[in-house]
Image (spheres, rainbow, N blue to C red):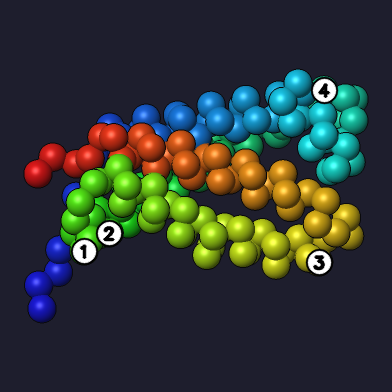
């Protein structure tokens, strides 16, 4: 059996990483969903005023990169199997992986959170938007043949 490594467009992965960060930045703005999220989590304006720890943003960027890289590889595998539109394959693959791995795991995790599922909806919606943005970038910029 011959092993094939998925073809990945690194430039699309890097742009998708940036797109994920932009989605999160907009999503958590106070006038978007930031205030409601802060209330659900238990933050106040004072508790977030000093900003996150120095390692948080590098970790977020790395995680967005890993997500984009994995989705690019999975989209390529999906496209090799199903054919057709690379954009559609990237979107459907992203959404299937989101439901199976992200949303399901967030619900399991948050079921044990003392706050209940108050935060889960915010997390799941944000992640759906992030995965969709990543899949769009990956899908419109497929790897070279």
Q: Which mark is residue 78?
A: 2
Give 96 or 52, whichever is nearer the viewer: 96
In the displayed structure image, the side of residue 34 where residue 105 appears, left or right: left
Quadrant in the rendering for residue 108: bottom right
Q: Which residue is painted at 60% across and 32% down in the image?
A: 24
Of callouts 3 and 2, the N-terminal one = 2
Circles 4 and 2 in contact, beta carbons < 8 Å: no
In the rendered image, is residue 120 in sight?
yes
Query: In front: mark 4 or mark 1?
Result: 1
Q: Which residue is mark 1?
A: 81
Q: In the rendered view, would you say 131 is above or below 100?
A: above
Of callouts 4 and 2, the N-terminal one = 4
Circles 1 and 2 in contact, beta carbons < 8 Å: yes
Mark 4 lies on a secondary structure that is helix
How far apart, in angstroms, are the residues tagged by discs 1 and 3? 38 Å
Circles 1 and 3 in contact, beta carbons < 8 Å: no
Residue density around tag 4, few if under 14, some if 14–19, many if 20 or more, within 10 Å: few
Quadrant in the rendering for residue 16: top left
Residue density around tag 1, few if under 14, some if 14–19, many if 20 or more, within 10 Å: few
Q: Position of residue 58 (x, y in %)?
A: 54, 35
Q: Which mark is residue 112?
A: 3
């Amino acid at each position: 059996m011959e092993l094939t490594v998925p073809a990945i467009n690194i430039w699309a992965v890097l742009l998708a990483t940036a797109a994920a960060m932009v989605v999160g930045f907009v999503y958590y703005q106070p006038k978007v969903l930031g205030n409601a999220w802060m209330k659900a989590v238990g933050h106040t304006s004072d508790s977030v005023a000093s900003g996150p720890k120095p390692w948080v943003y590098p970790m977020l960027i790395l995680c967005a990169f890993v997500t984009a890289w994995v989705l690019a590889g999975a989209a390529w595998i999906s496209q090799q199997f199903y054919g057709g539109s690379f954009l559609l394959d990237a979107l459907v693959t992203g959404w299937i992986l989101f439901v199976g791995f992200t949303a399901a795991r967030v619900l399991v995790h948050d079921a044990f959170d003392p706050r209940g599922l108050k935060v889960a909806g915010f997390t799941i919606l944000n992640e759906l938007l992030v995965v969709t943005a990543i899949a769009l970038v990956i899908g419109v910029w497929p790897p070279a043949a």
